Amino acid sequence: MGARDRLDAQFAFLTEADRLKQILRASPLTDGSRRENSGEHSWHLTLYALALADHAGPGVSIDRVIRMLILHDLVEIDVGDVPIHSANGTVHGSAEVAEAEARAADRIFGLLPADIGRPLRTLWEEFEAAESPDARFAKALDRVQPVMQNIASGGGTWTDYDVTFDQLEERVGRRIASGAPGLWAHVRERARGFFVR
């Protein structure tokens, strides 16, 4: 691949990535004025990683976590946002969604020259597997940010989807606790008040 073709491929990927700003998520902005988009979510998560780095476990590389977080939702360009508390029949984490996301990753990371696209795809896969310390911390942040958005907006999607506290613990809390136990202990108490009926 010549230098011109390489730059064309890099810019094609970056232009495609801009479409992430068009994907609306279920989560509201903290002021409740509108739903956030996936580009905003990814950016916000990188700030979470910087601001909450002291809650990462031993050996966690915040630089790698930030790279994962900026990439993790690019597949939503093709698949859309699948909320954890979804009420539309699409199940977050289902085999069907995982297959669609893998196809999207093939396409999107495949736009890049292979020496760039393959390592980024591998990093995305590491995030999805959530087995390394870096990925567990990144996943924890990905789960805690919508919780904080819901707290700030007066209940947000918990109200919209009639979420119970037990569902929050199972779907979100366990993942946060796995990668950042101190964060979940704190956020759990703040969230609990929204589920007193």
Image: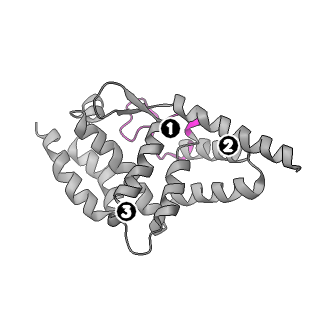
Q: Secondary structure at mark 3?
A: helix
How far separated are the C-alphas under marks 1 and 2?
Answer: 15 Å
Residue stretch in magenta: 76-96
Q: Is residue 146 left or right of residue 166?
A: right
| Mark found first going from the N terminus, 3 or 1 | 1
Write down the residue under mark 1.
39
Write down the residue under mark 3.
53
Dividing the picture into quadrants, the one containing residue 15 is: top right
Mark 2 belongs to which amino acid? Answer: Ile
Determine if the magenta segment contains residue 16. no
Image coordinates of residue 101 in percent, x first then y, are: 59, 44
| Mark found first going from the N terminus, 1 or 2 | 1
Q: Is residue 102 above or below residue 179?
A: above
Write down the residue under mark 2.
108
Instruction: From the viewer's side, name the closer residue of 196 and 30.
Output: 30
| Mark found first going from the N terminus, 3 or 2 | 3
